[in-house]
Image (cartoon, rainbow, N blue to C red):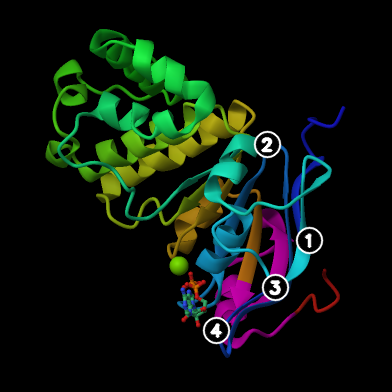
Amino acid sequence: MSTERGQMLLEARNIVKKFGGVVALRGVNFKVHYQEIVGLVGDNGAGKSTLIKVISGVYPPEEGEIYFEGRRVFFSTPREARDAGIETVYQDLALAPNMDASMNVFIGREVVRRDWKVFRTLDKKKMFEETKRVLRDILGVHVEDNAIRSPVLSLSGGQRQCVAIARAIYSAPKLLIMDEPTAAISVKERRKVLDLMLNLKQRGISIIFISHTLEEIFSVADRIVVLNRGNLVRDVPKEQTSIEDVVTAMVSGSSQNSDLR
Ligand SMILES: Nc1ncnc2c1ncn2[C@@H]1O[C@H](COP(=O)(O)OP(=O)(O)O)[C@@H](O)[C@H]1O
Ligand SMILES: [Mg+2]
């Protein structure tokens, strides 16, 4: 079966992306399997955000091909990627600060044809209950009823992160992309977000996880991919590498596995 663990969910082949004279991605081959967490690392400017934006339909690549669930795809907007099952939680979360959690989970649904009806017919109570259900049953986090009803600006960084993730997974994506989800939250809450990622993986969702904190990457990722100046310089199962090796690849771009694709 194509959805079995270990099969390919996403494959980006030979991706080239330029911004004027800057070559942000130089022929990157990147893959994600079903039910896999891929840790994507690299120094500032290595091309991480550009790669996930190519995958999520923000930028069309100059060269290369993207396959999702075995079919070639051409996403020209994030909406098209979302409809195919690829959701992204951006670093700034893009929440509406003065609206409560449930409004944030449902906001923007009006642009999705399928959900427009849902948005219109859901009353506040229903949205509240749905939000609570996603947080509790899918994310496995407990958020007080009062917190769900408060403007998200009054929530902690970790709670806001949960709201952003709840919104992303409400549409049951197959691939969740998280660009530095732990960068702006407390140490205590970081562990919660990492546990939440493992929980989502158990539910069959694959995740691309970008972080500068290699300890976090090593604690949840199954495979680690290192970008260096637009080149993919490492692609290894976590068990076959070390923090030292990854740091070396990040800073020098030396490619121990130069034959990898
Ligand atoms: N919108 C953009 N316009 C021009 N250059 C960009 C743009 N986005 C990224 N770049 C350049 O592409 C390279 C890769 O950037 P980025 O993907 O943001 O790296 P990372 O996320 O790994 O820090 C950098 O040289 C950056 O300056
Ligand atoms: Mg970035």
The residue tagged 2 is: 35
Residue at the image position 65 percent from the left and 48 percent from the top: 222
The span from disc 3 to disc 2 (Cα, nearest Å) is: 29 Å
Residue 186, x across and y down, in percent: 24, 49
Label number found at residue 62 = 3
Picture coordinates of residue 246, whole percent (x, y): 60, 71
| Lateral position of residue 156 relative to residue 141, left or right | left
Visible residue check, residue 200: yes
Determine crowd level at label 4: few under 14, some 14-19, many 20+ residues with C-alpha closer than 10 A: few
From the image, state whether disc 2 or disc 1 is nearer to you.
Answer: 1
User: At 60% across and 28% down in the image, what residue appears?
Assistant: 202
Identified by mark 2, the residue type is Gln
Q: Earlier in the sequence, mark 2 or mark 1?
A: 2
Residues 167 and 254: in front is 167
Q: Does the residue tagged 3 have its C-beta within 8 Å of any atom of ligand 1? A: no
The reply to whether callout 3 and callout 2 are in contact (CB within 8 Å) is no
Residue extent of the magenta highlight: 227-255
Residue indicated by mark 4: 251
Q: Which mark is residue 65?
A: 1
Residue kind at label 3, given as amino acid type: Glu
Q: Are marks 1 and 4 in contact (CB under 8 Å)?
A: no
Q: Label 3 to label 1, Cα distance in Å?
A: 10 Å
Q: Quadrant of the C terminus?
A: bottom right
